[in-house]
């Protein structure tokens, strides 16, 4: 073997080392293996997570069979050896942190601050970012007064089911931002309702369910909205008039999404009639 052969051999060894390192998962510093628990399934599964910093208690959405269900991170592994093609991915982390002033009204927490219980934040608690395409509705009823729902064009059977839904407390979130309204109703799944509330009149109400025409979810919302509008002037007239904004959410939802799994923060009860302070 001459000197030329020795130099070639060293080059081949060097190239082999570089190739080995390029295939090593240890170079991927922003990948974790996380175990996600799904309440709806009462089971946990492993997912790869890339470029998201996750901790136990975080709420996430994933790809694959559980893509429409929100999950809770119960374990995060930083050292592992897996074949990436065998795993689905964590696709989104949900913002479950609440901060601001909240008022109690029966089963709801109320906020008059757009930054506290905004539609964009809360909708993530119920709907996956890879959900269905936006719906189209051509049902546009003539405006009708909120205090006279007899003018709402709905079939009797659906009206009766809407009353039952209202009694069963199916409205989990409601928001009025100036004249624009948005709500989330629990049926066989969660549905979104959009509407316009202007001069005590309801305009252009529509639900994301598959019902042909107006539905029980809309009627249940209208009954809940009636109560809210009657309650506001006497109890929270000043707050609502100053902000022209109201958001209400079921207290049980807040517990399961924002408080139960929280590892730090504080809640201050100032008095029986004043706000809860959350930090």
Image (cartoon, helix red, strand yellow):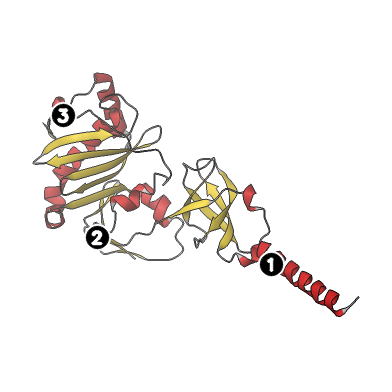
Q: Nearer the viewer, residue 113 or 27?
A: 27
Say whether disc 1 or disc 3 marks the residue closer to the N-terminus: 1
Judging by the rendered image, the residue that carries numbered circle 1 is 21
Judging by the rendered image, the residue that carries numbered circle 3 is 149
Give the Cα distance between marks 1 and 3: 69 Å
- Dividing the picture into quadrants, the one containing residue 215 is top left
In the rendered image of this protein, does residue 240 appear above or below residue 41? below
Residue depicted at 13% across the width and 26% down the height: 151
Residue 145 placement (x, y as % from top left): 11, 33
**Number of the front mark, 1 or 3:** 1
Q: Nearer the viewer, residue 189 or 194?
A: 194
Q: Nearer the viewer, residue 195 or 184?
A: 195
Q: Residues within 10 Å of mark 1 (few under 14, many from 20)?
A: few
Residue 37 placement (x, y as % from top left): 54, 49
Residue depicted at 42% across the width and 50% down the height: 256
Q: Is residue 115 left or right of residue 36?
A: left
Q: Nearer the viewer, residue 141 or 144?
A: 141
Q: Secondary structure at mark 2?
A: loop
**Number of the front mark, 2 or 1:** 1
In the rendered image of this protein, does residue 264 appear above or below residue 159? below
């Amino acid at each position: 073997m001459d000197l030329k052969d020795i130099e070639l051999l060293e080059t081949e060894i060097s190239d082999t080392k570089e190739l080995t390192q390029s295939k090593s998962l240890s170079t991927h510093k922003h990948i974790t293996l996380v175990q996600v628990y799904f309440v709806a399934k009462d089971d946990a599964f492993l997912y790869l997570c890339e470029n998201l910093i996750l901790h136990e208690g975080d709420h996430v959405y994933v790809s694959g069979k559980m893509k429409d269900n929100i999950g809770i991170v119960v374990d995060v592994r930083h050292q592992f050896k897996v074949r990436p093609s065998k795993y689905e991915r964590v696709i989104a982390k949900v913002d479950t942190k609440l901060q601001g002033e909240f008022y109690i009204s029966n089963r709801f927490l109320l906020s008059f601050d757009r930054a506290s219980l905004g539609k964009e934040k809360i909708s993530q608690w119920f709907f996956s970012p890879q959900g269905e395409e936006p719906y189209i509705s051509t049902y546009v009823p003539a405006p009708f007064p909120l205090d006279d729902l007899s003018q709402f064009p709905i079939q009797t059977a659906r009206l009766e089911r809407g009353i039952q839904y209202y009694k069963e407390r199916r409205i989990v979130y409601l928001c009025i931002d100036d004249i624009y309204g948005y709500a989330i109703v629990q049926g066989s799944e969660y549905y979104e309702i959009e509407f316009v509330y202007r001069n005590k009149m309801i305009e252009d109400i529509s639900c994301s369910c598959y019902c042909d025409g107006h539905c029980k979810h809309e009627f249940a919302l209208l009954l809940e909205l009636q109560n809210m509008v009657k309650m506001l002037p006497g109890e929270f007239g000043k707050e609502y008039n100053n902000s022209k904004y109201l958001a209400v959410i079921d207290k049980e939802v807040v517990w399961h999404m924002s408080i139960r799994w929280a590892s730090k923060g504080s809640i201050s009860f100032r008095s029986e009639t004043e706000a809860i302070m959350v930090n």
